[in-house]
Image (tube, rainbow, N blue to C red):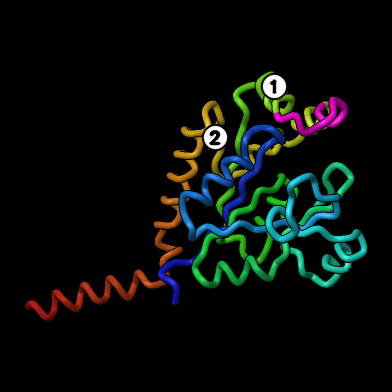
Amino acid sequence: MPERRGLLIILSSPSGAGKSTLARRLREWDSDIRFSVSATTRAPRSGETHGVDYLFHSHDDFEQMVADGEMLEHAEVFGNRYGSPKGPVIKSLDEGYDVLFDIDWQGGQQIRNSVRAEDVVSIFVLPPSIAELERRLKSRNQDSPETIAHRMTRSRDEISHWAEYDYVLINHDLDRAEEEIRAIVTAERLKRSRQPGLMDRVRALNNEFEDMA
């Protein structure tokens, strides 16, 4: 039996607030955190690799996976479908690993309502200001002005769901935000309910007291 149950770590934010960078840093910090590679119907961007960045599927294949109950969550974003395949997630949890999700509020809501809801830790990342959010989107040089405008419009809806999350932090500085997320994960791992072997450990300590008597 693993020493503890794995966590389902949901990391959400409006586009440009830093969740993808924070997700990468969190995985680099601890190899026990596995990343849930999302399935998507959108075309690969330059440099993206199937199975690493995303699992790229046709619309028909994606819809079949949903119909077969193979998705833990799924949603439509900017005209494309995204979802988290269930099998790898459940396997990792049962082996005692944490699984990290870089998803929007729709996906987070579905996971919080799933059969593994008790393992969820949800974190929402806010930008320090809307002006800074727009600056970050433009500085990435990945999207057209029209796409950036669309993302900015969508960010208002994303931010409106902040109160649904367990933790909310403001990404003034990436290093500080990373430290805060590490602290959250560490504390959640130490909860009694996530340490199935804790009772046996305490029982063993009590036995030592009896042996000393």
Question: Could you tell me if residue 131 is visible in this image?
Answer: yes
Q: Which residue is mark 2?
A: 169
CA gap, disc 1 and disc 2: 19 Å
Of the numbered discs in the image, which one, if any, rests on residue 26? Answer: none
Q: Is residue 146 magenta?
A: yes
From the viewer's perspective, is residue 39 above or below residue 77? below
Q: How many marks?
A: 2
Q: Are marks 1 and 2 in contact (CB under 8 Å)?
A: no
Considering the numbered disc 2 on the image, is that residue within a helix, a strand or a loop? strand
Q: Which residue is mark 1?
A: 135
Of all residues, the one furthest to the left in this rendering is: 213
Q: Which mark sits nearer the N-terminus, 1 or 2? A: 1
Disc 1 crowd rating (10 Å Cα; few below 14, some 14-19, many 20+) is few
- In the picture provided, is 83 more to the left or to the right than 3? right
Rendered-image quadrant of the N terminus: bottom left
Magenta residues, start to end: 140-148
Q: Is residue 35 magenta?
A: no
The residue located at (40%, 62%) in the rendering is 192
Considering the numbered disc 1 on the image, is that residue within a helix, a strand or a loop? helix
Instruction: Give the amino acid type for the residue marked by disc 1 in the picture.
Output: Arg
Question: Could you tell me if residue 73 is visible in this image?
Answer: no
